[in-house]
Image: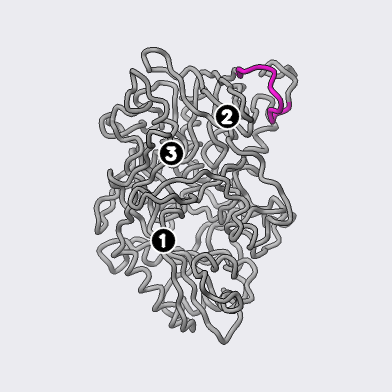
Amino acid sequence: MTDPFGSDQPPVVGSLDSDHIDCDIAIIGSGMGGATAAFALRDTGRRVLVIERGDFLPREEQNWSAAAVFAEKRYKNAELWYDGRTGKPFLPGVHYWVGGNTKVYGACLPRFRVEDFGAIRHPDGISPAWPFEYSEIEPYYCQAEKIYGVHGNGEGDPTAPWRSADAPYPELEHEPDLAALADSLNAQGLHPFHMPMGVDLRPDGRCIRCQTCDGYPCRLGAKNDAETRAITPALESPTVKLITRTLVKRIGTTPDGRTVTELEAVRDGRELRIRAERFILAAGAANSTALLLRSGSARHPNGLANSSMLVGTNYMVHASTFFMAVDPRRTNHVEFQKTLGINDWYLGNDREFPLGNVQMLGKLKAPMLKEARPWAPDLALKYIANHSVDLYLTTEDVPKPENRVRLDRNGKIWVDWTSNNLSSHAELLKRVTRTMKRAGYPLILTERMGIETNSHMCGTAVMGEDPGRSVIDRDCRAHDVGNLWLLDSSGFPSSAGLNPALTIAANALRVIDTGVIDG
Protein backbone atom coordinates (compact mmCIF):
# COMPACT_ATOMS: atom_id res chain seq x y z
CA MET A 1 0.00 0.00 0.00
CA THR A 2 1.32 3.44 -0.85
CA ASP A 3 2.35 5.45 2.18
CA PRO A 4 -0.04 8.45 2.33
CA PHE A 5 2.80 10.60 3.62
CA GLY A 6 4.67 10.04 0.36
CA SER A 7 7.61 8.12 1.83
CA ASP A 8 8.60 4.73 3.16
CA GLN A 9 9.15 6.02 6.70
CA PRO A 10 7.91 3.86 9.57
CA PRO A 11 4.95 5.08 11.68
CA VAL A 12 7.37 6.66 14.16
CA VAL A 13 9.08 9.36 12.15
CA GLY A 14 12.83 9.00 12.43
CA SER A 15 15.22 11.14 10.43
CA LEU A 16 13.72 13.89 8.30
CA ASP A 17 14.68 14.65 4.71
CA SER A 18 12.86 17.98 4.70
CA ASP A 19 12.16 20.90 7.00
CA HIS A 20 8.46 20.54 6.15
CA ILE A 21 5.88 17.85 6.89
CA ASP A 22 2.46 17.84 5.25
CA CYS A 23 -0.54 15.99 6.67
CA ASP A 24 -4.31 16.31 6.87
CA ILE A 25 -4.72 16.45 10.65
CA ALA A 26 -1.96 17.46 13.06
CA ILE A 27 -2.39 16.50 16.73
CA ILE A 28 -0.23 18.33 19.29
CA GLY A 29 0.26 16.06 22.30
CA SER A 30 0.04 12.30 22.80
CA GLY A 31 -1.62 12.20 26.20
CA MET A 32 -5.16 11.04 26.87
CA GLY A 33 -6.82 13.57 24.55
CA GLY A 34 -4.40 13.49 21.63
CA ALA A 35 -3.89 9.73 21.72
CA THR A 36 -7.61 8.98 21.85
CA ALA A 37 -8.20 11.37 18.95
CA ALA A 38 -5.53 9.59 16.89
CA PHE A 39 -7.12 6.23 17.72
CA ALA A 40 -10.56 7.49 16.66
CA LEU A 41 -9.19 8.89 13.38
CA ARG A 42 -7.12 5.84 12.43
CA ASP A 43 -9.63 4.41 9.93
CA THR A 44 -10.77 7.65 8.30
CA GLY A 45 -8.15 7.62 5.56
CA ARG A 46 -6.92 11.02 6.68
CA ARG A 47 -3.19 11.51 7.10
CA VAL A 48 -2.80 12.01 10.86
CA LEU A 49 0.41 13.16 12.51
CA VAL A 50 0.77 13.06 16.31
CA ILE A 51 3.43 15.45 17.59
CA GLU A 52 5.02 14.70 20.97
CA ARG A 53 7.68 16.89 22.60
CA GLY A 54 9.05 13.94 24.58
CA ASP A 55 10.21 10.47 23.60
CA PHE A 56 9.16 6.94 24.51
CA LEU A 57 9.57 6.30 28.22
CA PRO A 58 12.06 3.45 28.52
CA ARG A 59 11.09 0.18 30.18
CA GLU A 60 13.90 -0.41 32.62
CA GLU A 61 14.68 -1.59 36.14
CA GLN A 62 14.26 1.91 37.56
CA ASN A 63 10.58 1.98 36.52
CA TRP A 64 9.76 0.17 39.75
CA SER A 65 12.24 1.87 42.05
CA ALA A 66 10.60 4.23 44.53
CA ALA A 67 13.94 5.95 45.05
CA ALA A 68 14.47 6.53 41.32
CA VAL A 69 10.90 7.59 40.58
CA PHE A 70 10.15 9.78 43.59
CA ALA A 71 13.41 10.78 45.29
CA GLU A 72 15.50 11.17 42.13
CA LYS A 73 12.51 12.20 39.94
CA ARG A 74 13.95 10.17 37.11
CA TYR A 75 10.95 10.56 34.79
CA LYS A 76 9.95 14.14 35.60
CA ASN A 77 11.28 15.91 32.53
CA ALA A 78 9.24 19.13 32.48
CA GLU A 79 10.78 22.56 32.69
CA LEU A 80 10.35 24.65 35.84
CA TRP A 81 7.16 26.67 36.19
CA TYR A 82 6.69 29.60 38.56
CA ASP A 83 4.29 30.22 41.46
CA GLY A 84 2.54 33.56 40.93
CA ARG A 85 2.02 34.03 44.68
CA THR A 86 5.59 33.47 45.82
CA GLY A 87 7.63 33.97 42.64
CA LYS A 88 9.39 30.68 43.35
CA PRO A 89 9.98 28.00 40.72
CA PHE A 90 8.44 24.57 41.06
CA LEU A 91 8.63 21.28 39.17
CA PRO A 92 5.11 20.60 37.87
CA GLY A 93 3.42 17.21 37.84
CA VAL A 94 3.54 16.91 34.06
CA HIS A 95 5.55 14.40 32.06
CA TYR A 96 6.73 14.77 28.47
CA TRP A 97 6.59 11.22 27.15
CA VAL A 98 4.60 9.40 24.49
CA GLY A 99 1.38 8.87 26.42
CA GLY A 100 1.85 12.03 28.48
CA ASN A 101 0.88 11.94 32.13
CA THR A 102 -0.88 8.62 31.70
CA LYS A 103 2.54 6.93 31.77
CA VAL A 104 2.60 7.51 35.52
CA TYR A 105 -1.09 7.89 36.36
CA GLY A 106 -2.83 5.61 38.83
CA ALA A 107 -5.16 4.23 36.12
CA CYS A 108 -8.33 5.08 38.06
CA LEU A 109 -10.88 5.78 35.32
CA PRO A 110 -14.22 6.95 36.75
CA ARG A 111 -17.00 8.61 34.83
CA PHE A 112 -18.12 12.05 35.94
CA ARG A 113 -21.52 11.93 37.62
CA VAL A 114 -24.74 13.00 35.90
CA GLU A 115 -24.85 15.97 38.27
CA ASP A 116 -21.33 17.06 37.32
CA PHE A 117 -22.56 18.21 33.90
CA GLY A 118 -25.04 20.60 35.50
CA ALA A 119 -24.51 23.65 37.70
CA ILE A 120 -23.56 22.80 41.31
CA ARG A 121 -23.34 25.21 44.24
CA HIS A 122 -20.25 25.15 46.43
CA PRO A 123 -19.21 27.32 49.38
CA ASP A 124 -16.90 29.37 47.18
CA GLY A 125 -19.05 29.71 44.08
CA ILE A 126 -20.88 27.91 41.30
CA SER A 127 -19.48 25.01 39.34
CA PRO A 128 -21.05 25.89 35.97
CA ALA A 129 -23.01 23.61 33.69
CA TRP A 130 -21.43 22.10 30.60
CA PRO A 131 -22.92 22.91 27.17
CA PHE A 132 -24.17 19.31 26.95
CA GLU A 133 -25.60 16.80 29.39
CA TYR A 134 -24.31 13.44 30.60
CA SER A 135 -26.63 11.63 28.20
CA GLU A 136 -24.72 13.04 25.21
CA ILE A 137 -21.30 11.82 26.37
CA GLU A 138 -22.50 8.52 27.90
CA PRO A 139 -22.09 6.37 24.75
CA TYR A 140 -18.52 7.65 24.44
CA TYR A 141 -17.77 6.73 28.04
CA CYS A 142 -18.68 3.18 26.99
CA GLN A 143 -16.29 3.38 24.02
CA ALA A 144 -13.51 4.87 26.14
CA GLU A 145 -13.91 2.11 28.73
CA LYS A 146 -13.40 -0.48 25.98
CA ILE A 147 -10.35 1.29 24.58
CA TYR A 148 -8.74 1.61 28.00
CA GLY A 149 -9.81 -1.81 29.28
CA VAL A 150 -11.68 -0.64 32.37
CA HIS A 151 -12.37 -3.15 35.13
CA GLY A 152 -15.59 -2.53 37.05
CA ASN A 153 -18.83 -0.57 36.76
CA GLY A 154 -18.54 1.06 40.17
CA GLU A 155 -21.32 -1.17 41.51
CA GLY A 156 -22.21 -0.20 45.05
CA ASP A 157 -21.22 3.42 44.45
CA PRO A 158 -24.25 5.45 45.62
CA THR A 159 -23.47 8.21 43.10
CA ALA A 160 -22.69 6.02 40.07
CA PRO A 161 -24.27 7.40 36.89
CA TRP A 162 -26.49 5.28 34.68
CA ARG A 163 -24.79 3.37 31.89
CA SER A 164 -25.97 1.83 28.63
CA ALA A 165 -23.34 -0.94 28.69
CA ASP A 166 -21.25 -2.71 31.26
CA ALA A 167 -17.53 -2.08 31.54
CA PRO A 168 -15.57 -4.61 29.46
CA TYR A 169 -13.99 -6.39 32.45
CA PRO A 170 -15.15 -7.35 35.94
CA GLU A 171 -14.23 -5.38 39.02
CA LEU A 172 -10.92 -5.99 40.76
CA GLU A 173 -11.31 -7.91 43.98
CA HIS A 174 -9.99 -6.44 47.22
CA GLU A 175 -7.03 -8.19 48.79
CA PRO A 176 -7.75 -9.52 52.32
CA ASP A 177 -6.62 -6.46 54.27
CA LEU A 178 -8.76 -4.16 52.13
CA ALA A 179 -11.69 -6.57 52.21
CA ALA A 180 -11.58 -6.30 56.01
CA LEU A 181 -11.56 -2.50 55.72
CA ALA A 182 -14.54 -2.64 53.35
CA ASP A 183 -16.42 -4.74 55.90
CA SER A 184 -15.71 -2.17 58.60
CA LEU A 185 -16.90 0.67 56.36
CA ASN A 186 -20.09 -1.22 55.55
CA ALA A 187 -20.66 -1.76 59.28
CA GLN A 188 -20.43 2.03 59.71
CA GLY A 189 -23.25 2.52 57.19
CA LEU A 190 -21.01 3.57 54.30
CA HIS A 191 -20.93 2.15 50.78
CA PRO A 192 -17.39 1.26 49.76
CA PHE A 193 -17.17 0.19 46.14
CA HIS A 194 -14.68 -1.28 43.69
CA MET A 195 -12.89 1.49 41.81
CA PRO A 196 -12.98 1.40 37.99
CA MET A 197 -9.41 0.65 36.99
CA GLY A 198 -7.56 0.58 33.67
CA VAL A 199 -5.00 -2.19 34.12
CA ASP A 200 -4.41 -5.31 32.04
CA LEU A 201 -5.80 -7.90 34.43
CA ARG A 202 -7.57 -9.99 31.83
CA PRO A 203 -7.07 -13.75 32.24
CA ASP A 204 -4.10 -13.55 29.86
CA GLY A 205 -3.16 -9.99 30.79
CA ARG A 206 0.22 -8.64 31.77
CA CYS A 207 -0.65 -7.05 35.12
CA ILE A 208 0.83 -8.79 38.16
CA ARG A 209 -0.95 -6.65 40.81
CA CYS A 210 2.24 -5.07 42.10
CA GLN A 211 2.77 -2.11 44.44
CA THR A 212 4.43 -0.03 41.72
CA CYS A 213 1.51 1.28 39.68
CA ASP A 214 0.30 4.62 41.00
CA GLY A 215 2.96 7.22 40.17
CA TYR A 216 5.30 4.73 38.51
CA PRO A 217 5.80 3.80 34.86
CA CYS A 218 4.94 0.16 34.18
CA ARG A 219 7.85 -2.08 33.17
CA LEU A 220 5.44 -4.63 31.75
CA GLY A 221 3.23 -2.26 29.76
CA ALA A 222 0.34 -3.54 31.87
CA LYS A 223 -1.04 -0.11 32.70
CA ASN A 224 -3.72 0.82 30.18
CA ASP A 225 -2.29 4.21 29.33
CA ALA A 226 -2.53 6.43 26.27
CA GLU A 227 0.54 4.91 24.64
CA THR A 228 -0.27 1.23 25.03
CA ARG A 229 -4.02 1.44 24.39
CA ALA A 230 -4.37 4.28 21.87
CA ILE A 231 -1.11 5.39 20.24
CA THR A 232 0.22 1.88 19.60
CA PRO A 233 -2.95 0.58 17.89
CA ALA A 234 -3.40 3.88 16.03
CA LEU A 235 0.07 3.47 14.53
CA GLU A 236 -1.01 0.18 13.01
CA SER A 237 -2.93 2.28 10.50
CA PRO A 238 -0.90 3.33 7.45
CA THR A 239 -2.42 6.80 7.72
CA VAL A 240 -1.22 7.60 11.26
CA LYS A 241 2.31 8.62 12.23
CA LEU A 242 4.03 9.88 15.35
CA ILE A 243 6.92 12.30 15.58
CA THR A 244 8.73 12.52 18.92
CA ARG A 245 11.19 15.00 20.48
CA THR A 246 9.34 17.80 18.67
CA LEU A 247 8.35 20.97 20.51
CA VAL A 248 5.73 23.15 18.83
CA LYS A 249 6.76 26.74 19.44
CA ARG A 250 4.04 28.63 17.61
CA ILE A 251 0.82 28.21 15.64
CA GLY A 252 0.77 30.16 12.37
CA THR A 253 -2.37 31.43 10.65
CA THR A 254 -3.56 33.09 7.47
CA PRO A 255 -3.26 36.92 7.39
CA ASP A 256 -6.86 37.31 8.55
CA GLY A 257 -6.16 35.06 11.54
CA ARG A 258 -9.17 32.85 10.86
CA THR A 259 -7.39 29.70 9.71
CA VAL A 260 -4.35 27.84 11.04
CA THR A 261 -1.88 27.04 8.28
CA GLU A 262 1.15 25.53 10.00
CA LEU A 263 3.00 24.77 13.19
CA GLU A 264 6.45 26.15 13.84
CA ALA A 265 8.37 23.46 15.70
CA VAL A 266 11.84 22.42 16.77
CA ARG A 267 13.07 18.83 16.64
CA ASP A 268 16.48 17.98 18.07
CA GLY A 269 17.53 21.59 17.55
CA ARG A 270 16.32 21.72 13.96
CA GLU A 271 13.48 24.04 12.90
CA LEU A 272 10.52 22.29 11.35
CA ARG A 273 7.21 23.40 9.84
CA ILE A 274 4.18 21.14 9.92
CA ARG A 275 1.33 21.97 7.54
CA ALA A 276 -2.18 20.51 7.76
CA GLU A 277 -5.81 21.19 7.00
CA ARG A 278 -6.98 20.75 10.57
CA PHE A 279 -5.24 20.97 13.93
CA ILE A 280 -5.96 19.41 17.32
CA LEU A 281 -4.34 20.93 20.39
CA ALA A 282 -4.08 18.47 23.29
CA ALA A 283 -0.95 19.48 25.18
CA GLY A 284 -2.62 19.77 28.59
CA ALA A 285 -4.41 22.69 30.24
CA ALA A 286 -1.24 24.67 30.96
CA ASN A 287 0.81 23.90 27.86
CA SER A 288 -2.13 24.36 25.49
CA THR A 289 -2.65 27.77 27.06
CA ALA A 290 1.04 28.60 26.75
CA LEU A 291 1.06 27.70 23.05
CA LEU A 292 -2.02 29.81 22.32
CA LEU A 293 -0.52 32.77 24.15
CA ARG A 294 2.79 32.38 22.28
CA SER A 295 0.92 32.39 18.96
CA GLY A 296 -0.33 35.96 19.06
CA SER A 297 -0.33 38.12 15.93
CA ALA A 298 -1.68 41.43 14.66
CA ARG A 299 -5.08 39.75 14.33
CA HIS A 300 -4.73 38.01 17.68
CA PRO A 301 -2.82 40.54 19.82
CA ASN A 302 -3.62 38.76 23.10
CA GLY A 303 -2.88 35.26 21.88
CA LEU A 304 -4.49 32.94 19.39
CA ALA A 305 -8.21 32.21 19.91
CA ASN A 306 -8.31 34.74 22.76
CA SER A 307 -10.78 37.42 21.72
CA SER A 308 -12.70 36.53 24.90
CA MET A 309 -9.57 37.22 27.00
CA LEU A 310 -10.31 33.92 28.79
CA VAL A 311 -7.36 31.82 27.58
CA GLY A 312 -5.45 30.80 30.69
CA THR A 313 -8.14 31.78 33.18
CA ASN A 314 -10.32 29.53 35.37
CA TYR A 315 -7.47 27.09 36.05
CA MET A 316 -8.71 24.24 38.25
CA VAL A 317 -6.69 21.52 39.93
CA HIS A 318 -8.78 20.14 42.87
CA ALA A 319 -8.24 20.47 46.59
CA SER A 320 -6.55 17.20 47.49
CA THR A 321 -4.87 15.47 50.40
CA PHE A 322 -2.69 12.40 50.82
CA PHE A 323 -4.11 10.52 53.83
CA MET A 324 -2.35 7.74 55.75
CA ALA A 325 -4.27 5.71 58.32
CA VAL A 326 -1.75 3.86 60.48
CA ASP A 327 -2.19 0.96 62.88
CA PRO A 328 1.21 0.25 64.47
CA ARG A 329 -0.06 -3.16 65.60
CA ARG A 330 -0.61 -4.66 62.14
CA THR A 331 1.23 -4.72 58.85
CA ASN A 332 -0.61 -3.84 55.65
CA HIS A 333 0.11 -6.81 53.36
CA VAL A 334 -1.70 -5.37 50.33
CA GLU A 335 0.21 -5.43 47.04
CA PHE A 336 -2.30 -3.73 44.71
CA GLN A 337 -4.09 -1.22 46.93
CA LYS A 338 -6.09 0.74 44.34
CA THR A 339 -9.37 -1.15 44.45
CA LEU A 340 -11.54 0.62 47.03
CA GLY A 341 -13.36 3.94 46.81
CA ILE A 342 -15.89 5.91 48.88
CA ASN A 343 -18.36 8.39 47.38
CA ASP A 344 -20.89 8.64 50.21
CA TRP A 345 -20.05 12.32 50.62
CA TYR A 346 -19.41 13.14 46.96
CA LEU A 347 -22.71 14.97 46.46
CA GLY A 348 -22.97 16.12 50.05
CA ASN A 349 -25.44 13.56 51.38
CA ASP A 350 -26.44 15.28 54.65
CA ARG A 351 -24.56 18.48 53.79
CA GLU A 352 -25.65 21.51 51.80
CA PHE A 353 -22.54 21.30 49.62
CA PRO A 354 -20.65 18.38 48.03
CA LEU A 355 -17.56 17.21 49.91
CA GLY A 356 -15.70 15.01 47.45
CA ASN A 357 -14.27 11.63 46.53
CA VAL A 358 -12.12 9.19 48.48
CA GLN A 359 -10.04 6.58 46.69
CA MET A 360 -7.16 4.31 47.59
CA LEU A 361 -3.67 5.30 46.56
CA GLY A 362 -1.05 2.91 45.31
CA LYS A 363 0.91 1.64 48.30
CA LEU A 364 3.04 4.45 49.71
CA LYS A 365 6.68 3.66 50.49
CA ALA A 366 9.36 5.36 52.56
CA PRO A 367 11.11 7.20 49.67
CA MET A 368 7.75 8.69 48.69
CA LEU A 369 7.27 10.07 52.20
CA LYS A 370 10.76 11.53 52.53
CA GLU A 371 10.04 14.66 50.50
CA ALA A 372 7.11 15.59 52.75
CA ARG A 373 8.96 14.64 55.97
CA PRO A 374 12.68 15.10 55.21
CA TRP A 375 13.54 15.28 58.90
CA ALA A 376 12.06 11.85 59.66
CA PRO A 377 14.45 8.87 60.00
CA ASP A 378 14.25 6.42 57.11
CA LEU A 379 13.48 3.51 59.43
CA ALA A 380 10.54 5.38 60.94
CA LEU A 381 9.15 6.20 57.51
CA LYS A 382 9.50 2.58 56.45
CA TYR A 383 7.70 1.40 59.57
CA ILE A 384 4.84 3.85 59.01
CA ALA A 385 4.49 2.89 55.34
CA ASN A 386 4.41 -0.82 56.22
CA HIS A 387 1.58 -0.23 58.68
CA SER A 388 -0.55 2.26 56.74
CA VAL A 389 -3.57 2.25 54.51
CA ASP A 390 -3.23 5.10 52.00
CA LEU A 391 -6.02 7.21 50.59
CA TYR A 392 -6.45 10.21 48.32
CA LEU A 393 -9.11 12.79 49.16
CA THR A 394 -10.36 15.08 46.37
CA THR A 395 -12.75 18.02 46.57
CA GLU A 396 -13.97 19.89 43.51
CA ASP A 397 -12.65 23.43 43.09
CA VAL A 398 -14.68 26.06 41.25
CA PRO A 399 -13.36 28.11 38.33
CA LYS A 400 -12.05 31.53 39.29
CA PRO A 401 -10.75 34.07 36.72
CA GLU A 402 -7.84 34.94 39.00
CA ASN A 403 -6.67 31.32 39.03
CA ARG A 404 -4.80 31.29 35.77
CA VAL A 405 -1.85 30.22 33.63
CA ARG A 406 0.17 33.01 32.01
CA LEU A 407 3.50 33.68 30.31
CA ASP A 408 6.12 36.24 31.16
CA ARG A 409 8.10 38.16 28.55
CA ASN A 410 10.67 35.37 28.46
CA GLY A 411 8.02 32.74 27.69
CA LYS A 412 8.15 31.10 31.12
CA ILE A 413 4.96 29.58 32.51
CA TRP A 414 3.51 31.18 35.64
CA VAL A 415 0.60 29.73 37.60
CA ASP A 416 -1.53 32.00 39.77
CA TRP A 417 -3.48 29.62 41.97
CA THR A 418 -5.29 29.78 45.29
CA SER A 419 -7.18 26.64 46.27
CA ASN A 420 -10.88 27.04 47.07
CA ASN A 421 -13.74 25.07 48.63
CA LEU A 422 -11.37 24.37 51.52
CA SER A 423 -14.20 24.30 54.07
CA SER A 424 -15.74 21.36 52.21
CA HIS A 425 -12.36 19.69 51.95
CA ALA A 426 -11.79 20.14 55.68
CA GLU A 427 -15.15 18.51 56.41
CA LEU A 428 -14.27 15.59 54.11
CA LEU A 429 -10.96 15.18 55.93
CA LYS A 430 -12.78 15.24 59.29
CA ARG A 431 -15.21 12.53 58.22
CA VAL A 432 -12.58 10.26 56.73
CA THR A 433 -10.45 10.65 59.86
CA ARG A 434 -13.36 9.64 62.09
CA THR A 435 -14.21 6.73 59.80
CA MET A 436 -10.67 5.33 59.70
CA LYS A 437 -10.23 5.61 63.47
CA ARG A 438 -13.43 3.65 63.92
CA ALA A 439 -11.99 1.08 61.50
CA GLY A 440 -9.06 0.54 63.86
CA TYR A 441 -6.41 2.98 62.64
CA PRO A 442 -5.55 5.26 65.59
CA LEU A 443 -2.80 7.30 63.90
CA ILE A 444 -3.68 9.65 61.04
CA LEU A 445 -1.08 11.46 58.90
CA THR A 446 -2.06 13.90 56.15
CA GLU A 447 -0.36 16.08 53.56
CA ARG A 448 -2.22 18.71 51.53
CA MET A 449 -1.15 18.82 47.91
CA GLY A 450 0.34 22.07 46.66
CA ILE A 451 0.75 23.88 43.38
CA GLU A 452 3.13 21.29 41.97
CA THR A 453 0.55 18.47 42.23
CA ASN A 454 -1.40 19.36 39.12
CA SER A 455 -2.01 16.11 37.26
CA HIS A 456 -5.79 16.80 37.47
CA MET A 457 -5.56 20.32 36.05
CA CYS A 458 -8.29 21.56 33.75
CA GLY A 459 -10.01 24.73 32.61
CA THR A 460 -8.03 27.58 30.92
CA ALA A 461 -9.92 27.43 27.58
CA VAL A 462 -13.52 26.84 28.62
CA MET A 463 -16.13 25.50 26.19
CA GLY A 464 -19.47 27.21 25.71
CA GLU A 465 -21.91 28.64 23.19
CA ASP A 466 -21.18 32.35 23.74
CA PRO A 467 -17.88 33.42 22.09
CA GLY A 468 -17.66 36.31 24.54
CA ARG A 469 -17.71 33.96 27.54
CA SER A 470 -15.85 30.92 26.23
CA VAL A 471 -12.85 29.97 24.10
CA ILE A 472 -14.19 26.90 22.27
CA ASP A 473 -17.68 25.80 21.26
CA ARG A 474 -19.55 22.67 22.40
CA ASP A 475 -17.64 20.67 19.76
CA CYS A 476 -14.36 22.04 21.11
CA ARG A 477 -13.61 24.15 18.02
CA ALA A 478 -12.03 27.54 18.75
CA HIS A 479 -14.57 30.33 18.25
CA ASP A 480 -11.93 32.53 16.60
CA VAL A 481 -10.19 29.95 14.39
CA GLY A 482 -12.15 27.66 12.10
CA ASN A 483 -9.79 24.66 11.91
CA LEU A 484 -8.45 24.41 15.47
CA TRP A 485 -9.87 22.12 18.18
CA LEU A 486 -8.82 21.64 21.82
CA LEU A 487 -9.28 18.06 23.02
CA ASP A 488 -7.54 17.97 26.39
CA SER A 489 -9.01 19.06 29.73
CA SER A 490 -8.50 22.77 29.04
CA GLY A 491 -12.06 23.06 27.72
CA PHE A 492 -13.71 21.63 30.87
CA PRO A 493 -16.16 24.20 32.33
CA SER A 494 -15.83 22.46 35.72
CA SER A 495 -13.46 19.98 37.31
CA ALA A 496 -15.93 17.69 39.10
CA GLY A 497 -14.29 15.93 42.05
CA LEU A 498 -12.86 12.97 40.16
CA ASN A 499 -9.93 11.95 38.00
CA PRO A 500 -10.49 13.60 34.59
CA ALA A 501 -8.74 11.06 32.32
CA LEU A 502 -11.75 9.01 31.16
CA THR A 503 -13.79 12.15 30.55
CA ILE A 504 -10.99 13.59 28.41
CA ALA A 505 -11.03 10.40 26.32
CA ALA A 506 -14.83 10.23 26.08
CA ASN A 507 -15.07 13.88 25.06
CA ALA A 508 -12.44 13.39 22.34
CA LEU A 509 -14.43 10.44 20.98
CA ARG A 510 -17.62 12.52 21.10
CA VAL A 511 -16.07 15.33 19.07
CA ILE A 512 -14.45 13.02 16.50
CA ASP A 513 -17.76 11.22 16.02
CA THR A 514 -19.45 14.45 14.93
CA GLY A 515 -17.29 14.43 11.80
CA VAL A 516 -16.33 18.08 12.22
CA ILE A 517 -12.62 17.26 12.24
CA ASP A 518 -12.22 14.55 9.62
CA GLY A 519 -15.08 16.10 7.55
387 vs 437, left or right, is right
Relative depth, front residue between 251 and 267: 267
Figure coloring: one colour
Q: Which numbered dot is residue 41?
A: 2
Q: Main secondary structure of the magenta part?
A: loop
| Relative vertical location of residue 518 with respect to residue 196 in this rendering, above or below | above
Whether 15 is among the magenta residues is yes
In which quadrant will I find the N terminus?
top right
| Relative vertical location of residue 510 with respect to residue 325 in this rendering, above or below | above
* Nearest to N terminus: mark 2 or mark 3: 2
Q: Which numbered dot is residue 412?
A: 3
Dot 3 amino acid type: Lys
64 vs 156, left or right, is right
The residues bearing labels 1 and 2 have C-alpha atoms spaced at a distance of 35 Å
SS at mark 2 in the image: helix
Dot 1 amino acid type: Ser
Magenta range: 10-21
| Relative vertical location of residue 129 with respect to residue 213 in this rendering, above or below | above
Instruction: Identify the residue at image location x=57%, y=65%.
Output: 368
The residues bearing labels 2 and 3 have C-alpha atoms spaced at a distance of 33 Å
Instruction: Identify the residue at image location x=34%, y=26%.
Output: 479
**Is the residue marked by circle 3 packed among few (<14), some (14-19), or many (20+) residues within 10 Å?**
few
The answer to which quarter of the image holds residue 260 is: top left
The residues bearing labels 3 and 1 have C-alpha atoms spaced at a distance of 26 Å
Q: Which numbered dot is residue 320?
A: 1
- The mark lying in front, picked from 3 and 1, is 3
| Mark 1 touches mark 2? (CB < 8 Å) | no
Q: Can residue 162 be seen at all in this image of the molecule?
A: yes
Residue 343: x percent and y percent? 42, 64
